[in-house]
Amino acid sequence: ETGVTQTPRHLVMGMTNKKSLKCEQHLGHNAMYWYKQSAKKPLELMFVYNFKEQTENNSVPSRFSPECPNSSHLFLHLHTLQPEDSALYLCASSQTVRQETQYFGPGTRLLVL
Amino acid sequence: AQSVTQPDIHITVSEGASLELRCNYSYGATPYLFWYVQSPGQGLQLLLKYFSGDTLVQGIKGFEAEFKRSQSSFNLRKPSVHWSDAAEYFCAVSAGTYKYIFGTGTRLKVLA
């Protein structure tokens, strides 16, 4: 595998479910990001991790819980989501959090029923 | 506050025609500028970026973009569009950190 991979690619969950999104980067980067992409809205940065440490939580509701066990893996744990959380969730990575190019994964399309 | 505007929500061109997608930004200093492309069901792929130097930047898939400081613009161009270029294109600006500001995107349709 090369680049940034995300699993699952599609996820349907009820509002009472708990699920997790996984992201893995094979680029040797040290910074990883979660973005939310909703229809007709700009990409929203959710969380930033640098060398496994969270450096930004962009006022994201607590029903989204990130985890970064190492510089190559990033998870987004989901629980008690709302229908308005349905979106494409994109993971990205960059060499560091400084002025660096970000590389994106294919995303997980989430539908909350 | 920084912002990025992509004034065209949809653009339709015929295959083989030239293409220009507009991007205007608002930022006090010289920003770092990016163009990404997103095919249906896919993530964002970097087309090209401008950090400094030559204001005409070459990217992948035959795309280029020109940074015009006086117009606060970073328009994307391609001389001859292929059907496979149909996708959504995003312009982004970075002010010196990881905080990218993305435009709302331009969806390109290519007619055979």
Image (tube, grey):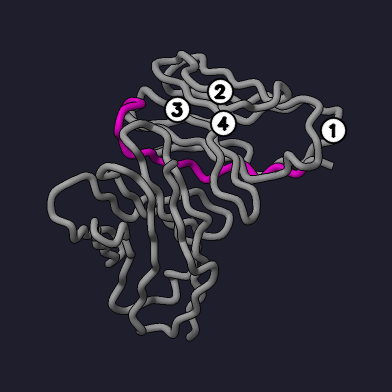
Residue denoted by label 3: A32
Subunit of mark 4?
A
Number of the label disc, if any, that sits on residue A46: 4
Helix, strand or loop status at disc 4: strand
Subunit of mark 1?
A
Name the residue: 49% across, 23% down.
A73
Could you tell whether B40 is left or right of B22 in the image?
right
Residue A83's place in the image compared with B84, above or below, is: above
Residue B85 location in percent, x, y?
Answer: 42, 69
Circle 3 residues within 10 Å: few <14, some 14–19, many ≥20:
many
Residue denoted by label 1: A15
Proximity of marks 3 and 1: CB atoms separated by less than 8 Å: no
Label 1, label 4: how far apart the Cα atoms are? 20 Å
Q: Main secondary structure of the magenta part?
A: loop
- Residue A21 is a magenta residue: no
Residue B84's place in the image compared with A20, above or below, is: below
Q: Say which label, 3 or 1, has the lower sequence index.
A: 1
